[in-house]
Image: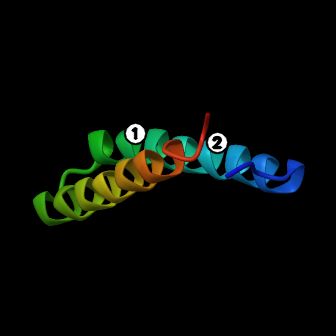
Amino acid sequence: MQLTQTEAWYLGESIKGETLMSQKLTTYREMAQDPKLRELIENLERSCERHLSLLSTHVK
């Protein structure tokens, strides 16, 4: 299915946003000293990776 120009733009922006969030979470995880907080951040990172993987399936 062909994406409209607006859909393609939104998809690209979503990928940029998830990538930025993933980078920030990596920085926060490296700074965190509390093991439970690190675990929470790691879970959020995995969620971002899943989102990126899903979004990437729509890029041709």
Most foreground residue, 44 or 53: 53
Q: Residue at x 29, y 53 (%)?
A: 46
In the image, is residue 36 above or below residue 26?
below
Left-right relation of 24 to 60: left
Percent coordinates x, y for residue 18 in the rendering: 54, 50
Q: Quadrant of the C terminus?
A: top right
Q: Which residue is mark 1?
A: 27
The answer to whether residue 46 is left or right of residue 53 is left
| Amino acid marked by disc 2 | Lys
Q: Which mark is residue 46?
A: none
Frontmost residue, 59 versus 14 = 59
* Dot 1: element: helix
Circle 2 residues within 10 Å: few <14, some 14–19, many ≥20: few
Identify the secondary structure beneath mark 2.
Answer: helix
Horizontal and vertical percent position of residue 7 = 78, 56
Give yes or no for contact between labels 2 and 1 (Cβ–Cβ under 8 Å): no
Give percent across and percent down for residue 34. Answer: 17, 59
Q: Residue furthest front?
A: 1
Q: Residue at x 52, y 49 (%)?
A: 21
Q: Position of residue 16 (x, y in %)?
A: 64, 42
The number of numbered badges drawn on the structure is 2
Cα separation, mark 2 vs mark 1, equals 17 Å
The residue drawn where x is 24% and y is 53% is 42
Residue at 53%, 41% in the rendered image: 19
The answer to whether residue 15 is left or right of residue 37 is: right
Residue furthest toward the right?
Answer: 5
Q: Report which quarter residue 30 is drawn in.
A: top left
Display colour scheme: rainbow
Q: Which mark is residue 16?
A: 2
Mark 1: few/some/many CA within 10 Å (<14, 14-19, 20+):
few
Q: Nearer the viewer, mark 2 or mark 1?
A: 2
- Dot 2 or dot 1, earlier in sequence: 2
